[in-house]
Amino acid sequence: MEKIGAYAEADRVTADGEWQAGNPATGQKATPMLSAYFNMLQRELLAVLSAGGVAPDVNIEDQLAEAIQRLTARNVTTVTGVSGGTTQALTIAEAGLVLVDATNGAVTLDLPAASDNGGLRYDLVRIDNSANAVSVTPGGTDTIDGAASLDIAVADRRTLVCDGTSVWRRPEPVASESQPGMAEFATPTEAANYLNDMLALSPSSLIAGVLGAGGAGTSDYIALPFRDKTTGELRHLIVQWGSEISSSSGPVTAYFPIAFPSACLRVVITSIGGGAGRASISGGQTQETASSFSLNTYDHAGARAPVTSGYIAIGI
């Protein structure tokens, strides 16, 4: 686009290349109404309509404003789910703010082809708090930053901008310890081997992946997380406990509530209950494996005796 000065003779325009009025008294020439200039203006305006996805119509006089609204993402579209699910193909005309209400059913939003739609933008906001799913899928072989789809959680807001080729970009800033933004949640598997500081942990992943399982029964275990000082890997120190009744005829194999993933490091045993000859098993002997230990107990006279024993085992 250029001023009229790029089309008219120098003595027909101002020094700044703009329109000027004629003056017969001074001999100043007026700027002519040149078809080349007006054709340029016409093409420029039609280009805005085309970029905004607006088809020219001689009977509509606010098309330029409509196209600018689309291009500046100022439209507001509401998509409402229905029972059985709703799939809506978003159009170029719906670029802008898209409010999604999945109260009555799941919603799938299909994006237009990324090719030739560079800069097209959707701000997707979920306004319901139901358990129904809301997902966004690109067309054909397009992706959303490499992914085949995008889920929108309750109270979530996502921005998608088309790169004009085959990718819809998510320009949200990535959250860090020093900068607010969007954070990706770790899966339970990723949480169990948590080495990526850019992944957030949900409460369920924190319990399942990091804190580990456990219980408080009479025969049970807990898993305590720690960072391996050599490898940096997240591991778990497992503490198990239970009881076993030994035999006077020989050793008894006592099985842990769960097998230690790597090894049993220590077993501590003691007698429980009362009665003569059962106050001490200080002479007890153990042979540990990852899943069990072998227990011998003796009475005060040093003879094998059946003793109810409690144990605590520590391993990894």
Image (cartoon, grey):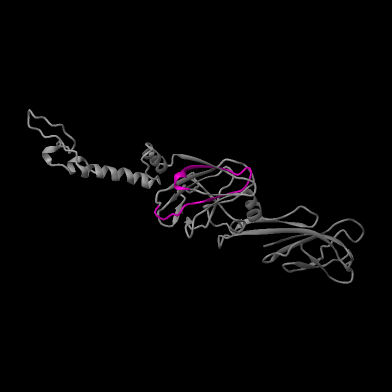
| Residue appearing at x 77%, y 67% in the figure | 293
Please determine whether, in this image, residue 52 is positioned above or below residue 61: below
Q: Pick the residue in front: 242 or 69.
A: 69
Percent of width and height locating residue 56: 37, 44
Please determine whether, in this image, residue 141 is positioned above or below residue 108: below
The quadrant in which residue 13 appears is: top left
Q: Residue furthest top?
A: 25
Residue 94 among those drawn in magenta: yes
Q: Pick the residue in front: 75 or 248.
A: 75
Q: Residue furthest front?
A: 59
| Residue appearing at x 80%, y 59% in the figure | 242
Please determine whether, in this image, residue 182 is positioned above or below residue 257: above
Q: Classify residue 39 as left or right of residue 143.
A: left
Percent of width and height locating residue 251: 84, 70
Q: Residue furthest bottom?
A: 250
Q: Which stretch appears magenta? A: 91-116
